[in-house]
Amino acid sequence: MLLDDRSKYVLKAIVLSYIKTAIPVGSQSITRSFDMGVSPATVRNIMADLEAQGFLIQPHTSAGRIPTEKGYRFYVDNLLQEAELRKDQEDILAQADQLIQRETIQALLQDTSRLLSDASQYLAIVTAPKFSSTRIKQVEFVRLRKNSVMAVCISQDGFIQNKFFEVPEDLSQKDLNKISDTLNSLYSGLTLQEIRQKLLRQIQKMKDLYDHLLEEALELTRRTFIEGGAGGGDAELYMDGASHMIDLPDFADFRVMKGLLSAFEEKRAIVQLLDKYIGTEGVQVYIGSENSFLGDHHCSLVVSHYKRGDQILGTLGILGPTRMEYSKIIPLVDSTAKKVSRLLEESSREEGSPLGEN
Amino acid sequence: MLLDDRSKYVLKAIVLSYIKTAIPVGSQSITRSFDMGVSPATVRNIMADLEAQGFLIQPHTSAGRIPTEKGYRFYVDNLLQEAELRKDQEDILAQADQLIQRETIQALLQDTSRLLSDASQYLAIVTAPKFSSTRIKQVEFVRLRKNSVMAVCISQDGFIQNKFFEVPEDLSQKDLNKISDTLNSLYSGLTLQEIRQKLLRQIQKMKDLYDHLLEEALELTRRTFIEGGAGGGDAELYMDGASHMIDLPDFADFRVMKGLLSAFEEKRAIVQLLDKYIGTEGVQVYIGSENSFLGDHHCSLVVSHYKRGDQILGTLGILGPTRMEYSKIIPLVDSTAKKVSRLLEESSREEGSPLGEN
DNA sequence: TCTTAGCACTCCCCTAAATAGAGTGCTAGT
DNA sequence: ACTAGCACTCTATTTAGGGGAGTGCTAAGA
C-alpha cells in the first residue's frame, strides 16, 4: 500500500489531468505534460502497479487510466500539499470576503450559497442552523385571529422562525405582549435544551403560584420550543448552481442528471446527507460511494461548518462530480465557512447583552 | 384562413398525435388511428393545404408533419371543445381538492406548486401576492438590537413578511408595542395605496399635535409600507417539478435544458414573464414565441390567477414544452386557481372583522 | 535489477457506404 | 372530388473499414 515517490507523482499527474479534461490519461501524455525524465514504458509499468493496487482503472483495454475513488481519496489525503492549496489562496479569500453582514442569518446563507456556486461552478449547499440548537434571543407572539397565534422566534444569530398555534382561549394582543415580556425575561439567551429543563422546574412552581397569564405563557413556551410543531420546518436548505452541473461531461447520462435534479427537489436526502457528518471539525471530503447518495450520483462532497464560538450551527459545502477540482474547492469551502462564522461572531458582538435592554 | 371541418379534424389529429408521441405525423398514421373514411392520399392533400396556411411544417421533405405554433394556437382556441376539457374533469377536480388550509399563504402556495407539478408532470410556477397589493391586517414591531427593528407584516390573506430597519433612536420593545397598537388601529384593513394616502394626511396633522411616539410610529409606517426596503423581496416565487422536464424529448438538446435551468435559478425572468400577463381574467395560454422567453426555450405557459373577492392576488401556472397536454393542463390550472381562491376566501371569512378584536 | 526501445495487439472512434423505411408529391383513373 | 399507384426524397440505422491512441510483453542496454 505504501507508494514510492514516483508512483505518487504519477498518480497525482493522472488525477490532475483527468480532473482537467475528463479524458482517460495515457502514459505518453504524462511524460509529455509532466516531464519526469522517464520513458512512457516506465510510466506504464508504474500505472500497471497502481491499477493492481486499486488506484486506477482502465475503462477498457487500450485506453488510458482514470482514477478510482480510492485514487481520489489517496490524492486528497496525501497528495494535496499545503503549497497546492495555498496557490490561489488570495483569490479564494477575496471571493469569500465578498460576503457581508445581512439582516438575518437566512439572507446571509442565501448569499453564501450563491457565492459558493458562482465561485466553484458546482452545486452549493448550505443548511440553516437547527432551530433547536440556537440560543433564543427573543420571542414575540402575534395574534392572527381568534384562537390562532403566531410566534416569531429570533435567535441570537439572527435566525428568524415563525411558528403557528391554535390556542384554546382567545388571547388579545395585549395579553400576548405581556406573555412575550415574561417569556423573554425568563428564557432569553438559553438553548432549547436549557429551556426545556428550566420549563420543567417552572411548571412545578406554577402549581403554587396561580397566575393565569403565566400559565398561558408556559403553555405557549412549551409548544413553541418543545413540540416539533408546524411551520418553518426545522431543516432549511439553500442550494444554488444546479445549472452548472448540466454541461459537465460527468453527467452526460440523462438518468444521472435526472436523479440529481429530483434529489435537489426532494431536499430531504440532501439534508440527511449533511446531517450525517455534522460534528466533524474542519473541511471534510466525501468521495463517491463512501456515501450511498454520493455514489449513486457519481458525486463528491466537500463540506465544512460554520459556528459561533464553539457551537456548530450549520453546514456548508459543495457537491460536484467525483472528478472535482479539490485543490480549489477545499480552500474555498474552508475560507467561506470561516468567513460566515466571523460574520456571525461580529453580529452577535454588536447586539450587546443577550437579554437586550427592554 | 377558414378551415372546413375535415381540415380541422386532421389538424386536431396531428396535434393530438404529436403531443402524445413527439414523432412527426404522417398521413397514413392518421387514417389508421383516427379512421376518418378517407384515404391517406386525401389526408395528404389536406395536410399540404394546412402547411401552406402555416399550421404545420415538415422537419424535412419526406417526413411527417408537426404543428407550428400557429397550429397549436388554432388547436387551443378552436379545437379544444368543452367536452374535451371536461373529460377528466372529476379526476382533475379531485387533484385540486387535495389542497388544504394552511397557516400562511406561503405554505399554501408551496403546496400548490407541488401539487401542480405532480399532477401535470411539468414545471409549476406560483407567485406570492405582491405585498403592495394586499390589505394589511396587522403589523408588529420587534426590537432586534440597539437601533435595529424588524416589522412583521401580516396581510388579511395570511401573507407574512418581515422587513428590517435601522432606527435613529433606541426604541424599547414596550415602545414598539405601543407603536404597533397605534398603527394597527389606524391602518388595519387598508391596502398600501390607501395607507399611503392616509399617511399624507396624518403627517399634516402631526405637525399640530406633537407626540413623540406617534411621530416614530408614522416614520416606521412610512418605511414599512412605502419604501421598497430590504428583506423579503417583493416577488416570491414557488417552482416545482424541474426534474420532470429533463426527460422530455423536447429538451433533449443540452443547451435548451441548461438555459431553462439557469432561468429557473435566476427567477427574475420568470417573474417578469408572469407579471406581464397579470390582470387578464381566467386561464390564459401563451404558446412559444408569442413571448420571447417562451420562444427561446421552446415552451408554452398556461396561467391563471387566484384572487380574493375581485382582487387578483397572484399568478399560478404551468410551464411545459410547446407540445404540452393542453386539454389536461388547462382545466388543471383552472380548477387549482379556483380552489386556492376559495381557500383564501374561507380563511378570510374565519377571521372576523378586519380590525380584529384587540 | 531497473529502465527503455520496439512491436504486435486491442479496442474505440470516426467516416463512408449501403440499406431499409416512412412519407411525400404527382399523375392518372374512377 | 377522391383514390390508387408510383417514383422520389430524405432520414435513420446498420455495416465495414481505416486511423490512432494506448497497452502489455519481450529483449536489450545501463
Image (tube, coloured by chain):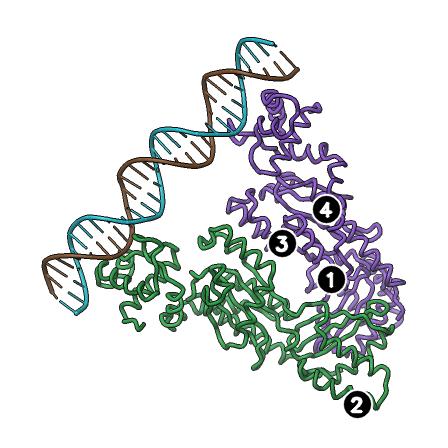
Chain colours: A green, B purple, C cyan, D brown
Distance between the alpha carbons at the discs numbered 4 and 2 = 56 Å
Where residue C14 sits: x, y (%)?
A: 35, 41
Task: For mark 4, name the chain.
Answer: B
Q: Residues within 10 Å of mark 4 (few under 14, many from 20)?
A: many
Mark 4 secondary-structure assignment: helix
Q: With A295 as the anchor, is B192 left or right in this view?
A: right
Which of the numbered marks, if any, corresponds to residue B332?
4
Distance from Cα at disc 3 to Cα at disc 2: 53 Å
Task: Give the residue displayed 87% in from the left and 59% down from the top.
Answer: B349
Residues at marks 4 and 3, CA–CA distance in whole angstroms: 23 Å
Q: Nearer the viewer, residue B180 or C10?
A: C10
Density class for disc 1 (Cα within 10 Å; few <14, some 14-19, many ≥20) is few
The residue singled out by tag 2 in the image is: A205
Name the quadrant containing residue A269.
bottom right
State the mark number for residue B267. 3
User: Nearer the viewer's eye, disc 3 or disc 1?
Assistant: 3
Tell me the quarter of the picture where residue B1 sits.
Answer: top right
| Relative horizontal placement of residue B160, taking residue B352 as reference (left or right) | left
Q: Tell if the residue under mark 4 belongs to the same chain as the one under mark 2.
A: no
- Secondary structure state at the residue bearing disc 2: helix
| Mark toward the viewer: 3 or 2 | 2
Residue at mark 1: B227
Q: Chain of mark 3?
A: B
Tell me the SS state at disc 3: loop
Sooner in the amino-acid sequence: mark 4 or mark 3: 3
Residue B2 visible? The answer is no
Residue A231 percent coordinates (x, y): 72, 67
